[in-house]
Image: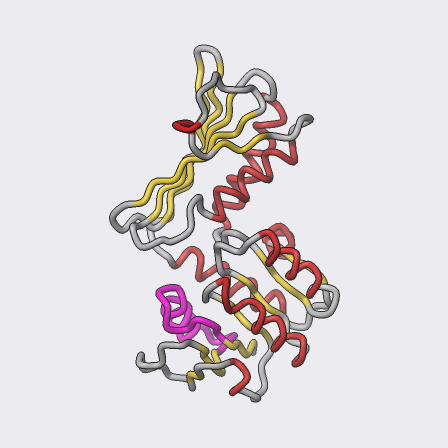
Amino acid sequence: MTRIILNGCNGKMGQVISRLVAEDETCKIVAGVDINDFIPNPYPVFKNLDDFSGDADVIIDFSHPSSLEGLLTYAKRRNLPIVVATTGLSSEQKEELGAASNIIPIFFSANMSLGINLLIALAKKAAAFLEGSFDIEIIERHHNQKIDAPSGTALAIADAISDSLKEPAEFIYDRHSVRRKRKKTEIGISAVRGGTIVGDHDVIFAGNDEVIELKHSAASKEVFAVGAIKAAKFMKGKKPGMYSMPDLVGDI
């Protein structure tokens, strides 16, 4: 049995995880943490992580980037693994995760979907094969309540593609402000916000007289919750270090 502390339990993703864990006999949520404690849950909810001192095996974090510092402090003090599924972390905060991984096990992925991570793997192979002869564009679409743009997943795709190229790529977010022809080393990243779109990501490879597209569409938030729960079970008892979706997929 994997005992989970769910940070951000009353958010949209937190509630999806709560429902799925309730149907899973191999894990349970022993405590939730959220600044909004008005939603009834089948487990105790605290406004502050420090208020819970019970036994747990892992923390799932689906909260807000501003809570990261307190989360890491708590996890290090209690020697607990963390599954960080919160998006919109700054480069400095990602460095903090790396430093903390020397002390505790940390699982971090910009997207918990198994399908999106397959898309990333395919995009890396395509980029390496097509380098120099195809232009690369990434388009992401999300609901109108999403705050950060571009999405963490779009940036993760761009980073993975750039790492697979011989020449580092230049990310271009706003062509309206760049009055020049497109460079071959560019990766264009565009964000769309509207309606209730859960999450779409397209990777376009545009060459002379032909276009190749890789696309992933999430129909519900469950795909991310399922991945986070699998990651929590995977992280139980792990040694300090930084873990990611490829580690989980390899284990499966």
Front-lying residue, 109 or 228: 109
Q: Position of residue 235 (x, y in %)?
A: 63, 67
Front-lying residue, 201 or 96: 96
Residue 78 against residue 145 in the figure, above or below: below
Image quarter in which the C terminus is found: bottom right
Front-lying residue, 100 or 54: 100
Which residue is rendered at x = 51% and y = 39% of the image?
119
Q: Where is residue 188 in the image (x, y as percent from the top left)?
A: 47, 30
On the rendered structure, is 57 left or right of 174? right
Image quarter in which the N terminus is found: bottom right
Residue 72 against residue 131 in the figure, above or below: below
Which residues make up the magenta segment? 6-28
Residue 153 against residue 2 in the figure, above or below: above
Front-lying residue, 221 or 190: 190
Q: Position of residue 158 (x, y in %)?
A: 54, 37
Residue 26 falls inside the magenta stretch: yes
Which residue is rendered at x = 51% and y = 60% of the image?
85
Q: Which residue lies furthest to the top in this view?
A: 209
Q: Position of residue 250 (x, y in %)?
A: 64, 52
Find residue 41 and report its image quarter: bottom left
Find residue 123 and report its image quarter: top right
Q: How is the image coloured?
A: secondary structure
Residue 70 falls inside the magenta stretch: no
Badge count: 0
Which residue is rendered at x = 44% and y = 71% of the image?
8
Which residue is rendered at x = 65% and y = 36% of the image?
163
Find residue 168 and report its image quarter: top right
